[in-house]
Amino acid sequence: MKRFEGKVAFIAGGTTGIGLGIARAFVAERAHVVIVGRSRDKGEAALSELEAMGGDVRYISADVTDAADLERAVAQTVQKFGRLDCAINNAVNSRDNEDHLPTHEGSIESYDRFMSLLVRAVWVGMKYQLQQMMKQGSGTIVNTASVDALRCHSGGAGQAIYCAGKCAVIGLTRAVAKEYAKKGIRVNSLCPGGFDTPLMDELYVGKSPEEAEELTNWLNAQIPMGRLGNTPEAAAAVLWLCSDEASYVTGHNMVVSGGMD
């Protein structure tokens, strides 16, 4: 029997990148899987792929920055499958050049947009996920942070808003983990480094082959293991955090970064 056979996994930001990798891993473990994302095209493409793997999967179109959308997505998940065992809050954004501006040149609108996605969406997601898990008396949550949340203590210049948001995710995770530690609910965070995902691909847009090779070499040089991670490596960490093998692990920030800090 697979570890998650019959379990229900809810993945916000599950239509691409690391989130889709997590969905693939849950499908392979025979879980019922719900993927949530704003782009219907990406959602339907991901759904087709996961169903081709034999998965019992649903796609819910929702904007995680909209509290009503998140509440509806969790409610539809429970309505369909009757419970919620594993929740992954993994929403990401396309790279925004404004995030790389010096702080004195940044806009209030950019700050609000980033914090709504990076922090508020995680808090709101947990709010509704925890309501169901409290009824069950069990459940696990994993929130995606970033190695940038760690690096900002010694660097991270030019990404102040992003670093602040991801630091907040770690803080939220630890505090909520303590609140629910005696309720049968575990809450942890994943701290990925550089991964080979469509988000990373955006860095290469418009670059010549020579510039692309130079960028690849530079990226690899930042990582002690000398390469980007692949999505199954991130997914394996998340599934372990959600599994009974991690039954005594809560409030933990798992760094999966090839040695970056």
Image: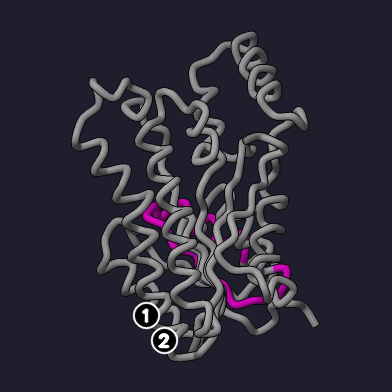
The reply, left or right, for residue 111 in relation to residue 197 is left
Instruction: Count the labels in the image.
Output: 2
Residue 79's label in the rendered image is 2
Query: Where, quadrant-wise, is the N terminus in this rendering?
Result: bottom right
Q: Residue furthest top?
A: 210
Q: How crowded is mark 2: few (under 14 residues within 10 Å), some or many (20 or more)?
A: few
Q: Name above or below for residue 128 compared with residue 227.
A: below
Residue 165 in which image quadrant? top left
> Can the viewer see residue 195?
yes
Identify the residue position indicated by label 1 in the image.
75
Q: Are marks 2 and 1 in contact (CB under 8 Å)?
A: yes
Secondary structure at badge 2 equals helix
Residue 208 in which image quadrant? top right
Residue extent of the magenta highlight: 28-50
Residue 123 picture location, percent across and down: 36, 63
Residue 144 picture location, percent across and down: 52, 53
Residue 185 picture location, percent across and down: 53, 79
